[in-house]
Image (cartoon, helix red, strand yellow):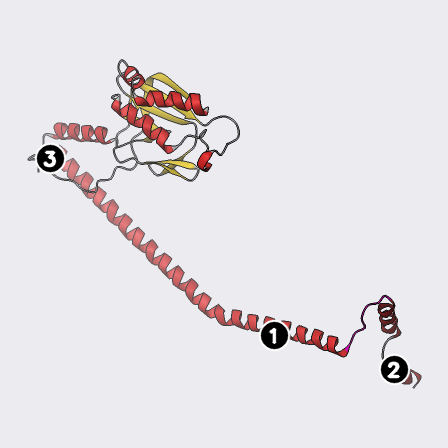
Amino acid sequence: MTLLTEMLQRPLDPGYAAAASRRLAAGEPAHTPVGTALVTLTAVLIGLVFAVAASAVRREAPRQAAVRLDVIAQVEQRRALVEERSRAISERQGEIAALEARILGAGGGGQIQAELDALALASGAMPVQGPGLGISLADRPGEPQAEEGGIDQGRIQSRDLFIVVNALWESGAEAIAINGQRLTVRSPIRFAGSAILVNFRPLTPPYEVSAIGDPARLPGRFAATLGASYLKSLSDNFGIVTSIEAAPELTLPGATRVNVDRARPLGGAS
């Protein structure tokens, strides 16, 4: 009975009363019913927000699952299409090989094969080997330095390689490759972000330009072109490291992207 009487007469724990007294002594406002109600209302609102959010997430779950299943179905459909077309390409390649073998076996195969080899050589599809010229370009040593327009002039740009390659063609180069990427008449040299793309493949410096050509004429002709002067300007004005050396033997791979969009008979040939 004494405990029950104590709880009825003093329902608030003495510790709470002491804490309230210290707040008042420190000059802090005492808790009021209005403040307590606001705290309670805020807690209720927060709980309501969480409940609404959880309900919304639960309602969206079936829709997200449906979208996921749709994406998976599209991926499987595209994969099946790729496999089907890959099989069709393999079949066509087999038919072409069979026709070539039939033509070569029917007589006159040596001449046709020689023509095919000459076309492969001219288009860049065939690996080649021979003497020529090697040109190396490397970025300026040290930390990159952003200059006017936010471009570091000490870094090799795609236009630098473009100018050098055009000068080599002009000088009589028969085959050119950059870092092992064989160039054809359809090879793009582009600048994408911080990388240079050749044949849509990103390359990293130093850039090694290899050109096969007449060793008695190619170096002298290149030295007289705008490309040689441009290389010297890159070195003198921007600190780009360049070198030009005659190469007694170069081996260039065949191009990996030799596609024909349009074709027509040459002269009266069928």
In this view of the protein, which residue sits in the foreground, 201 or 194?
194
Image quadrant where one finds the N terminus: bottom right
Q: Dot 2: what SS?
A: helix
Tell which residue pokes out farthest to the left in this image.
Answer: 268
| Disc 1 residue type (three-letter) | Leu
In this view of the protein, which residue sits in the foreground, 55 or 91?
55
Question: Which residue is painted at 35% across and 25% down in the image?
Answer: 209
Image quadrant where one finds the C terminus: top left
Identify the mark nearer the N-term, 2 or 1.
2
Q: Is residue 125 magenta?
A: no
Task: Please say whether residue 180 is visible from this viewpoint.
Answer: no
Identify the mark nearer the N-term, 1 or 3.
1
| Disc 3 residue type (three-letter) | Leu
Magenta stretch?
26-32
| Disc 2 residue type (three-letter) | Met
Q: Which mark is residue 21?
A: none
Q: Which residue is disc 2 drawn over?
A: 7
With respect to residue 13, does 227 lie above or below? above
Q: CA distance from mark 2 to mark 1?
A: 35 Å
Q: Position of residue 145 (x, y in %)?
A: 50, 32
Q: Position of residue 153 (x, y in %)?
A: 44, 30
Task: Please say whether residue 183 is visible from this viewpoint.
Answer: yes
Question: Which residue is painted at 87% across and 84% down in the image?
Answer: 8
Q: Is residue 30 magenta?
A: yes
Q: Which mark is residue 266?
A: 3
Prevailing SS of the magenta stretch: loop
Q: Dot 1: what SS?
A: helix
Left or right side of 59 for 234: left
Tell which residue pokes out farthest to the top in this image.
Answer: 216
Which of label 1 and label 3 is nearer to you? Answer: 1
Q: Which mark is residue 48?
A: 1
Question: Which residue is painted at 39% across and 60% down in the image?
Answer: 71
